Image (spheres, rainbow, N blue to C red):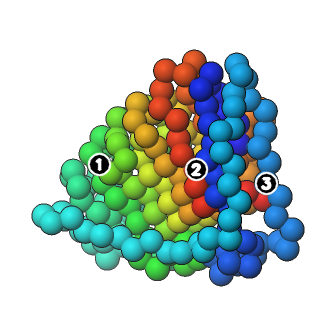
Amino acid sequence: IYASSTRSYCHIMLSAPEVLRPYIIPAVPESLRVHIIEGENGMTVRSLIFTAAAFSLIAASVPVGAATLHVPSEYPDIQAAVNAAGEGDIVMVAGGTYTGASNREIEFTGANIVVTSVPGPELTIIDCEGAGRAFAIYKGEDSTSVIRGFTIINGSSGNGGGLYISGASPVIENCVISNCTASMNGGGVYYGYASAQGYIRYCAFYGDSSQYRGGGIMLDQGYGDFMPVEISNCVFYD
């Protein structure tokens, strides 16, 4: 993790590898290594908490009045469903491996929506095929926007090989982000310039890398003028 700010902090809760094993592709190694890497401008790590908390699936709740859009039974790909979704809607993605141009570089439209898999990350895979990242969220979405329950593999981009978030504050939860690369920063996730509290929780990062900073996650808060991101119940390993 690389956090860039004068006021950055990371709040990290780690689960035991044997708890995670059913959700990881490939399986979690017996030795789990976690790296809190360099910061700048006097960055401090305010709390670093190690626990054996369970890596549990988080059920999606559907707000009253929200529409539910199903992929692929109603929409052929994830981007088509996201484009059709309005404020508060939920995109439900069936299990399977999703590839192709409309299942990567998936951009939210500015509406706050939930994009969630039905069976969880072990059965719902977005394979970016080295041709881009999975999601890009940068139109001011808040923490009622959620990405939940995907394994994201083989992402590649400049900033944010797996996911790119800038100027927005979505929740990323119950995801596996594996073998994603960035030619600049944030091999797994680039999360920057959030104007409200953002969250990454119940996620596992495996084999992600970047050329410069944040092989797993790059948190970019500029010079401390933006909100920090809370990272909890996540694991990072090579």
x and y, in percent, of residue 70 in the image: 30, 71
Horizontal arrangement in the rendering, residue 177 relative to residue 37 (left or right): left
Q: Nearer the viewer, residue 191 or 67?
A: 191
Quadrant location of residue 99? Answer: bottom right
Q: Quadrant of the C terminus?
A: bottom right
Dot 3 or dot 1: first in sequence order is 3
Horizontal arrangement in the rendering, residue 77 relative to residue 188 (left or right): left
Q: Nearer the viewer, residue 58 or 10?
A: 10
What residue would you read off at disc 2?
A: 231
Crowdedness near tag 3: few (<14), some (14–19) or many (≥20) residues, C-alpha within 10 Å: few
x and y, in percent, of residue 20 in the image: 67, 74
The amino acid type, in three-letter code, at marker 1 is Asn
Q: Secondary structure at mark 2?
A: strand
What residue would you read off at disc 3?
A: 34
x and y, in percent, of residue 33 in the image: 83, 58
- The mark lying in front, picked from 2 and 1, is 2
Q: Is residue 1 above or below residue 77?
A: above
Tell me what residue is drawn at x 65 percent, y 45 percent. Answer: 47
Mark pair 3, 2: CA separation:
13 Å
Horizontal arrangement in the rendering, residue 209 relative to residue 12 (left or right): right
Q: Secondary structure at mark 1?
A: loop
Dot 3 or dot 2: first in sequence order is 3
